[in-house]
Image (cartoon, grey):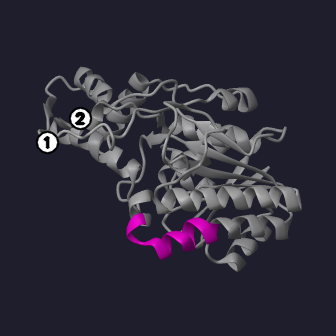
Amino acid sequence: MRVLVTGGSGLIGAHVTQAVLDLGAEPVACDIAPFRLPTSADSSSVPFVKLDISDLDALCSALEQHRIDRIIHTAALLARTCQEQPPQAVRVNAIGSVNVLEAARQLGVGRVVMASSIAVYGHLTSRIVDEDHPCNPTTIYGAAKVLAENCGRAYRDDHGIEFVALRYGATYGPGPAKPPSRGVATDLRAFFERAVRSREVVLSDQDDLGRPLVYVKDAARATALACCQEKPVSSLVLNVAGERAATLSDCAEVLAQLIPELKITRREGPSVSAAVRPQSVALSIDRAREELDFQPQYPLERGISEYVEWLQEGN
């Protein structure tokens, strides 16, 4: 089985490429940035195509040249960059996603797995969110993801493409030092880098809110399973997160055990009223457990420990 991984040079895409290899399939990475595997493995063993997903002809050529059977679509601009550059966000995250679906239709690719996000939910009506929660995105990034999911549904219904979108929680872990766009993933990297390199963590009141953190290797494994398992995924969308929600204060406590000289301080600031204060949230992953036999393998302590070790090695 040959699998095209769009956004293969990104945080999730690089780990997805490795996870596809681990499942015995043959990945082909594509991106606009140089590609390397997130491990010490020889990246030259993975074919790489430099292309922009907004170029439909280039996508079709790549699928044909490499005789692709399935696609994992992770290429996207992150949330903050989308807010700053809405036209670019639509070009890459919305039109680019439709191009992936259209290329799959034209070349007869049977399955497309798309990286989506908790951002599709927007305003929350529950502290534990399952896939039936209404989608009320409050950002350009979230809106583009909803559009891409809905287009995936249409291609599934109209053209028979097996489509599933994975709604990741806040993903953290080893990855590119200078990604081409900015969002929650880059904020989390800055948080952990500061702890390791400056021996300092500065917390605010919002850092006591629970977040559906997911270690990047768990996110990648769920994605590879959705793509490579023999049976199709019956659901259109699946949540992917760790076993439990965790706060950045929880993360700081784990970091303090790994870095004894770590200094943890609290940032003073005006209190936020209950009416506008963000709420703690957890993602239900029951559906992913059932349909993918997915079980997170990196609880918070293990994920942070591995990530800290990677950063301490100078990455």
Where residue 11 is drawn, which disc sits there? none
> Is residue 183 positioned above or below 41 on the image?
below
* Chief secondary structure of the magenta portion: helix
Can residue 195 be seen in the rendering of this structure?
yes
Decide: marks 1, 2 in contact (CB < 8 A)? yes
Closest to the observer: 278 or 8?
278
Confirm whether the magenta stretch covers residue 34. no
Residue assigned mark 2: 205
Amino acid at dot 2? Asp
> Is residue 237 positioned above or below 287 on the image?
below
Closest to the observer: 128 or 31?
128
Q: Which is more N-terminal, label 2 or label 1?
A: 2
Amino acid at dot 1? Gly
Q: Is residue 178 left or right of residue 37?
A: left
Q: Can you name the residue that lies furthest to the top here?
A: 257
Q: Residue at x 14, y 39 (%)?
A: 267
Residue assigned mark 1: 269
Could you tell me residue 271's position as x and y percent? 19, 39
Local crowd size for mark 1, using a 10 Å CA cut-off: few (<14), some (14–19), many (≥20): few
Give residue 274's quadrant in the image. top left
Q: Which residues are magenta?
A: 83-96
